């Protein structure tokens, strides 16, 4: 899908390049191709990412709600963490020391199921920790903020920020990975089924 996006973007991109050849025959001064390219780039989201220095991810998620739509359904703290990649204070989260035997932790934004209760383990880090997620539920990105290289995890359905993944810490789990997730980004459903929509 990404390749297809690139291909169609390149086709769009090629139009101004071709058109600049035509005015050369006319008496008008030759166009400035560089300006044409830069002007065209911001209208093409995929290509504009190459020109951007910000680490913003450009993936598209099935749930494409606007910030205003998210503000209408999330608390200010949920918005800060899920949509602005904030972090809750260590040891303060609702699910930090929550160890049910069954059930599912869903995304607090879009309700997509993310982690099973059986994925959760005691890490002592101050945030809920999971050694794995439901297949495909979580998407990873490189996060270079704060002078560190970390792996950010987001909800694959809405792109909501969950936390980070750390590997090789030596926890006695099947994956030796720790999904360090903000409680604020989660909503627990003890029936284990599809989490219900927020009332
Ligand atoms: Zn979500």
Image (cartoon, helix red, strand yellow):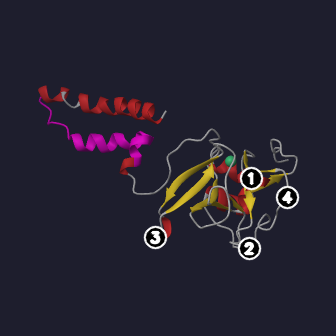
Q: CA distance from mark 4 to mark 3?
A: 36 Å
Q: Position of residue 129 (x, y in %)?
A: 70, 62
Circle 1 crowding by C-alpha within 10 Å: few under 14, some 14–19, many from 20? many
Q: Nearer the viewer, mark 3 or mark 1?
A: 3
Q: CA distance from mark 4 to mark 2?
A: 18 Å
Q: Are marks 2 and 3 in contact (CB under 8 Å)?
A: no
Q: CA distance from mark 4 to mark 1?
A: 18 Å
Q: In the rendered structure, does residue 124 fall within the stretch colored magenta?
A: no
Q: On the rendered structure, is 157 left or right of 59?
A: right
- The answer for how far apart the CA atoms under marks 2 and 3 are is 24 Å
The disc label shown at residue 108, or none: 1
What residue sits right under mark 3 in the picture?
147
Q: Secondary structure at mark 1?
A: loop
In-image side of 193 versus 134 (left or right) = right
State the residue at coordinates (40%, 45%).
Answer: 48
Q: Main secondary structure of the magenta part?
A: helix
**Residue range corresponding to the magenta coloring:** 26-49
Where residue 21 sits: x, y (%)? Answer: 18, 29
Mark 1 and mark 2 in contact? Answer it, CB < 8 Å.
Answer: no
Q: Residues within 10 Å of mark 4 (few under 14, many from 20)?
A: some
Q: Position of residue 70 (x, y in %)?
A: 69, 50
Q: Are marks 4 and 1 in contact (CB under 8 Å)?
A: no
Residue on which disc 2 sits: 91
């Amino acid at each position: 899908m990404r390749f297809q996006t690139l291909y169609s973007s390149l086709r769009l991109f090629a139009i101004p390049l071709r058109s600049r050849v035509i005015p050369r025959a006319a008496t008008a001064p030759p166009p400035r191709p560089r300006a044409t390219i830069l002007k065209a780039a911001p209208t093409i989201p995929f290509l504009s990412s190459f020109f951007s220095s910000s680490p913003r991810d450009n993936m598209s998620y099935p749930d494409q709600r606007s910030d205003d739509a998210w503000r209408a359904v999330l608390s200010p703290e949920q918005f800060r963490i899920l949509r602005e990649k904030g972090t809750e204070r260590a040891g303060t989260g609702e699910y930090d020391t929550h160890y049910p035997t069954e059930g599912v932790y869903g995304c607090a934004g879009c309700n997509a199921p993310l982690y099973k209760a059986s994925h959760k383990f005691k890490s002592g880090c101050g945030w809920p920790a999971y050694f794995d997620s439901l297949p495909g539920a979580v998407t990873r990105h490189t996060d270079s903020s704060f002078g560190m290289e970390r792996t950010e995890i987001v909800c694959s359905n809405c792109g909501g920020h969950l936390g980070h993944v750390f590997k090789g810490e030596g926890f006695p789990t099947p994956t030796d990975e720790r999904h360090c997730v903000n409680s604020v980004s989660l909503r627990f459903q003890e029936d284990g089924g599809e989490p219900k929509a927020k009332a």
